[in-house]
Amino acid sequence: MFEGQPQAELDALFKANPEFRQLYHHHKELDKKVLDAELGVLPVDDSTLLQMKREKLVAKDRLSRLFESLKH
């Protein structure tokens, strides 16, 4: 996420906006858990996996909106 963005721009957002920083780290954590669950490393049932994916998507959507609003 945000792979094409300059690191300095992201670092500035992390410093300036605690909500952005928290959401970014939460999204990364969920991404790792979802990947681990899909690989079978993290044993979770289907409904838990679906819930994690939904939560990850909500975080990503919020991050994208925050990024656009803070970038301008």
Image: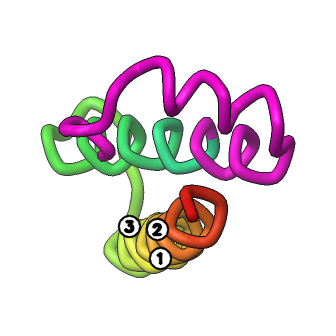
* SS label for mark 2: helix
Q: Residue at x 81, y 52 (%)?
A: 19
Q: Position of residue 67 (x, y in %)?
A: 54, 60
Separation of marks 2 and 3 at Cα, in angstroms: 22 Å
**Residue position marked by numbered label 2 in the rendering:** 64
Image position of 6 (left or right of 54): left
Residue nearer the viewer, 20 or 52: 20
Q: Residue at x 79, y 27 (%)?
A: 15
**Residue position marked by numbered label 3 in the rendering:** 49
Image position of 51 (left or right of 26): left
Q: Residues within 10 Å of mark 2 (few under 14, many from 20)?
A: some
**Residue 11 is one of the magenta-drawn residues:** yes
* SS label for mark 3: helix
Image marks 2 and 3: residues in contact by CB distance under 8 Å: no
Dividing the picture into quadrants, the one containing residue 46 is bottom left
As shown in the figure, which amino acid type bears the numbered disc 3? Leu
The stretch in magenta equals: 1-25
Q: Position of residue 13 (x, y in %)?
A: 66, 38
Q: Nearer the viewer, mark 3 or mark 1?
A: 1
Q: Position of residue 37 (x, y in %)?
A: 29, 46
Q: Earlier in the sequence, mark 3 or mark 1?
A: 3
As shown in the figure, which amino acid type bears the numbered disc 1? Asp
